[in-house]
Amino acid sequence: MEKSEESSLVMPGESLCVIEEFEPGPGAYEGSDGKVYSQVVGVPVYDLDERIVKVEKLSKKLSIPEIGDVVLARVIDVKSIYAAVKIFEVEGKPPLTGLFSGILHISQVSTSFVRTLYDVVRIGDIIRAQVLNRAPLYQISIRGREFGVVYALCSECLTPLVLRSLQLFCPKCRRVEKRKVAFSYYMVRRSSA
Amino acid sequence: MPRSEEIIPKIKRQQIMSMLAKGERLDGRRLDEYRPISIELGVVEKAEGSAMVRLGNTISIAGVKVELGKPYPDTPDEGAFIVNAEFLPLASPTFEPGPPDESAIEVARVVDRGIRSSGAIDLKKLCILPGEKVWVVYIDVYVLNHDGNMMDASGLATIAALLIAKMPKVAVKEGKVTILDEWVPLPVVNRPVPVTMAKIGEKIVVDPSLDEELVMDCRITVTIDESDRICAVQKGIGGSLTVDDVKYASKLAVEKAKEIRKALPPLPSIEDVEWIVKEGQ
Amino acid sequence: MSQLVRKVERPPRLIDEEGRRADGRKVDELRRIKIEVGVLKNADGSCYLEQGRNKIMAAVYGPRELHPRHLAMPDRAILRCRYHMVPFSVLERKSPAPTRREIELSKVIREALEPAIFLEYFPRTTIDVFIEVIQADGGTRCAGITAAAVALADAGIPMRDLVAAIAVGKVEGQLVLDPMDLEDRYGEADMPVAMMPSLGKITLLQADGLMTLEEFEKALELAMRGIKEIYNKQKEALREKYLAIKREVEVT
């Protein structure tokens, strides 16, 4: 059946079919009357094999950090066993609708022993991390080579640090600083500069 | 609530600075170029005067109301006006509900100074009974979307709303004041135009966008009246300007104000207008 | 530039012999409605609505982190709502600070929108709805709800249905749809209603003034007819914006 362009766009609350025909997928839900309705402004897609109807959203894509997401966050406070961060971006997802608070515990830095978090991150650093869970704050982990600090400033003169033979080095005041650096440190720094 | 915006500046500043060095801006404007300005007049029929100004994506709306009131003790023979500005929480993810914060108050006061020192409103004409009854002009300015330079958007909305505002005539008989159902223009005799500039690194740009405001070192607003006189100046945020900067900025402001004033409605013709009818004298 | 309104004076009759109201409408006729979607660039979703002389701006932010954090719910988002009138929206200047009326309306509007939103999808966050009345001419809470629902859909927030709202008034013994300020002021009753139209569920119902049971039932039916019409306008406005976006998506 050929549908006109007009009717192929549905609104929240528009009925799509009855539950006997298709089960609701993403963007759709089953009402108390046994009908399936759209939740969003979008285009309905009927999957005849799986017997599922979903609505492909045209309105703003929302994202809040979810378990398993790889995120970019800024460090706002460091204590010896935990650090507070603000998550501002989820990789591969639409922009967040705000900043989300997270926490990095010393046990989530590495599989080996870490004496203090001050050797791992500093205030103002931007880190790449993975979301572990969401209660009560987002718990994040930087275990693994691909996670850790991706952008850091010199704690003396605030010049962006560069990665030089596995150490963070300040090109201006020639300080060497300690961090747990992510594999992608140099690349992220370059693309953002 | 802060967004990633608080993190971006550090990264963006480099980009903005290197573009400015080449005489370019993020949105493709020249350094001395305003974003497109549109002024919509009389958007609120219940206000005595109103205007909605769009400066790129920044939107400001101003409304004028007149009410009878008492004069200030030091100016018994003059009417009064009050400018109030608020940044609505719907205008930006970083604005919170509540009474006006210091930057909203700053906008209100700079707009107020422009009107006051240019004598834009002939306050003598608003006096009904000296020391007892005068007209009070309330100007409320609301920012609906914040994309930088709320100062100019608000200042323009204010003067545009005043220019088209109407107020009722009054009759005075034996010390009694009656409001008549006859409407006359507000005695507006000058059109001050604020021009806001930002200093980023060594460069000065007019009409800073939000991105530019987030990285700017200093801000300066120069308000220019109908005959190219400076009637208000405000240096904003931290940072500093050199004497040359200020000279350049004021010269640029005169030039820009002339350009922008063309978008404003003309001064009302008030030569033969009577605001107060005196009876039984 | 439209004609300034300076005074609301009661005409001798609010409804004439031919059943016409002061502004020329029939008793069951809505005011002219204009809805624009996505008018504020900063907001996650926004809507500008004109209903006769009512001018409403609505914006949605979120879901975003809630401060102070202890107010957050572990299993769902909370909805916050602010209804506010600008000082020049009415004939007598209104003080900019929120009044008791605005605080109450913020609450009932929130409760009218809440049932429509899948709040459970965004635990521990807040969705903020801001409604600014730029000009008021009767029925602003309903117009605010209508606009806010469109802004929520524009923000991409999953909803059970849109919410549309309208008031029914009683003027000179007759029920009228969508009363304006003049009719509100001199009428005998006023009943704002909000619904999720395709689910047939009422999410806001208030009334003041006197009505018989029969009148009340009739008023409800009249409101439902009005809501259907408004619902269509909401969908039309969203469709207009998103058909263009859909075409763009298809091209790329």
Image (cartoon, rainbow, N blue to C red):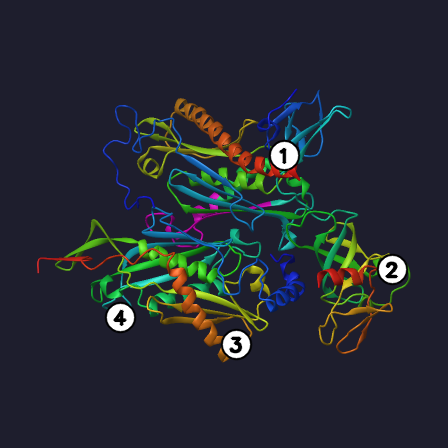
Q: Residues within 10 Å of mark 2 (few under 14, many from 20)?
A: some
Q: Where the C terminus of chain B falls, by quadrant?
A: bottom left
Q: Which residue is mark 4?
A: B75
Q: Nearer the viewer, mark 3 or mark 1?
A: 3
Q: Residue at left 30%, top 36%?
A: C186
Chain letter of disc 4? Answer: B
Q: Which residue is mark 3?
A: B241
First in residue order: circle 1 vs circle 2: 1
Question: In the image, residue A139 lies at what x, y percent?
Answer: 77, 54
Q: Is residue C142 visible?
A: no
Query: Horizontal placement of B82 versus C206: left or right?
Result: left
Q: Which residue is mark 2?
A: A110
Query: Which numbered marker is on residue A42?
Result: 1
Tell me the kind of residue under disc 2: Ser
The magenta stretch is: C79-105
Q: Nearer the viewer, mark 2 or mark 3?
A: 3
Tell me the kind of residue under disc 1: Gly
Q: Residue at left 62%, top 55%?
A: C67
Query: Horizontal placement of A34 versus A81: left or right?
Result: left
Q: Residues within 10 Å of mark 4 (few under 14, many from 20)?
A: some
Query: Which element type, helix, strand or loop, lies under badge 3?
Result: loop
Co-location on one chain, circles 1 and 2: yes
Co-location on one chain, circles 3 and 1: no
